[in-house]
Image: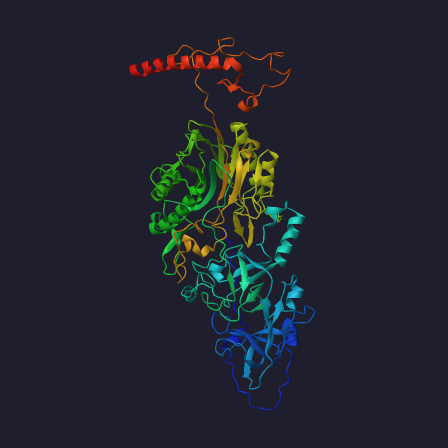
Amino acid sequence: MAYLPRVRAFAVTSAFALAFTPLVIPSTSSAEPSLTPIPQVRELAAAGAEDPVTTRGVVTASYPTGGFFGYYLQTPGTGGDVNLESPSEGIFVYPGKKQRIPEVGECVTITGVPGEYNGLKQVSKVTTTVDEVDCAPVTPLNLEALPRTDAERDAIDGMLVAPQGAYTVTDNYSLNRYGSVGLAFGESALIQPTDVLHPGEEAVAYEADNLMRSVTLDDGSNWNFSKKKEAQNSPLPYLTLDTPVRVGAPVSFTAPVIFEYRFETWNFQPQGQVVGLEGAPATFANTRTSAPASVGEADLKVATFNVLNYFTSLGEDEDGCKGYPDRDGNPISTNRCNVRGAYRAEDFARQEAKIVAAINAMDADIVSLEEIENSSRYGKERDTALAALVKALNADAGEGVWAYVPSPTEVPNNEDAIRTGFIYKPATVMTVGESLISADPAFEGVARSPLAQRFAPVAGEDHAGTEFVVIVNHFKSKGSQLAGEGNEDAFDGQGRNNAARVAQAKALAAFAKDNFAGVPTFLVGDFNSYTREDPMVALSDAGYFTQETPGEYSYMYSGRVGSLDHVVANQEGVDLLTGLTTWEINAFEPVALEYSRYNGNVTDLYAADPYRSSDHNPELFGLKVLTPVTPEPEPVQPGEPGVADPVQPGDPGVVGPEQPGDPGAGSGTAKPTDPAAAAGGTQTGEGLAVTGSAAGLTLLVALALGLAGLGLSTLVRARQ
């Protein structure tokens, strides 16, 4: 899913302003100019005043580079405690490119025209006078909480603040383009409303609260790092391979920032342009993990993984195919071609290396795959790309570690360019029968048909194994709209094509029940539906239940986390589960680390590791499918050489079963079996106690039988 580009522009008011050459005039007059207080200048700016005003203040932020070409001015001596009832004491000053931008801390008097530019209150057409007198210094506002309303935020707009309390990264998608990071006030990222609430009024209200918790940490520039050459040759702000800015990471502010409204959003603006890590006012905790969390004491582990258009068919081999270029103009990934994914062989190698690293690090026994090439669309065997991935996995993990499930004999006629598939480890699990693809028309031409496979553990002689079924899915996305009622965006949080996904969910449930009733069954993959949306509810109504791990999510979109990828099970499947986890290695990592952004910036951000190998986080679950088997002892036949015949009650030296009233037996009382419990008694091999002279007779009989057995056994060994 692509984001709409954010419009970035610096404050230019008119062609006259560009042509105007302002002057820096040293203050030599002893006469005090008539000054307009900054709060009043802001009122005039909002009213669209055209007459110049003169004001004085302390420079709190300075942007001679990065495209702002201006600075922030604040009333001398202000700051400290926040008062949301008083008007703001700060304003942006735009003198333009040709005038010197004063440094932070300078005291200046300016004359210029108040106004607004895309909501940013500013003074332009400026004459700046550098004062020789000192101004009282500005103290950062102690911002203990993020103001929740626009009116409250306007009270500190343009002022220097020191953010207090917890902030969390909730969006890093724009870091690669605009050098900005979306933050949420609090200890968690913002959540997609329909991942926690059913669509409707409650979800709408939940999103309103999300907006009140939102603020953007910018980089002190308006550069577009995806297009501007100067920006591409400057290190991306905040980000290196060793300092990932991950969604969900706690934020620590190390310097004050300007709180402002710019680019139609509320921002924390650093006091100067951030270049790489230089000038950064905040740091981000590294929340990466090197392996998935435990899924319990499982016999087998199953994963589901969207591999982001893994295509062995390349853009360079398709006539007329164009690619998204790196900063040197080399195409890296395909751009609206028949093939999807990497453009050149070297680009594919980088993509494949990250996917291989991720899959092998998961240590799963079965992996369902989404968004792998359907090679039959490109004149090849259907499993060509699937086989190539297995070959690459085995080159890393060892020969024969992985195998793939071949395509079934019957496949739908109208398949998409991408498909689903299975890979597995033959040492621990085996397929049972051929795979099966749904032919339901709900998937025809609009999505990937569900693919089912029955599996069984490799049990061994001492265990019995339970068979189970995994069905991998990839429902219609929320992107391009399909025809038909209910597929338009109802603005209830579910996006486009909700009716199509509901139909697919019902068809999937019918497919599973018709073919695998009573068998433990797991529906997995990319459902393109958040947890509380109608398609997932339809599956629940049909007896297939979404398994959840609170606080873990598979996707991030528009600064909101949620799960589009799910593990859904019937009751028989639920009974086998030992645990579930989401390995958050992809959706929460900056897109700048993706193979498709290779050489997009002067900082090398590529590594052949699992992080940002896709845009979806893989999900992993454990199954208890092995039952220990206790072997039955082989029966011993009477009369075999070297084996004594069974001893019968009444034989010499053997005491028969006690009857009530026998000497030494208590009526209805269990016989003691501990030798110490039988006074003067001896325990026999049958657990029966004997006493007195009978014990001596038994000893003689046993000795005779033992000697006879020794002779017979010696004979048997001699004949062997």
Q: Quadrant of residue 235?
A: bottom left
Q: Nearer the viewer, residue 699 or 228?
A: 699
**What percent of the width, then of the height, locates residue 244?**
47, 57
Q: Residue 145, position in %: x, y?
A: 63, 63
Q: Quadrant of residue 703?
A: top left
Q: Which residue is at 64% across, 52% downward?
A: 206
For the point 53% across and 16% down, the residue is: 691
Task: State which quarter of the image contains the C terminus.
Answer: top left
Across the whole image, how many numbered discs are drawn on residues?
0
Q: Is residue 589 left or right of residue 85?
A: left
Residue 444 in sight here? no
Q: Is residue 203 above or below residue 625?
A: below
Task: Pick the residue in front: 656 or 490.
Answer: 656
Is residue 471 placed above or below 280 in the rendered structure? above
Q: Is residue 208 above or below residue 375?
A: below
Residue 19: x and y, percent? Answer: 50, 77
Q: Nearer the viewer, residue 669 or 138?
A: 669
Using the rendered image of the protein, determine whether residue 135 is visible from the camera's viewpoint.
yes
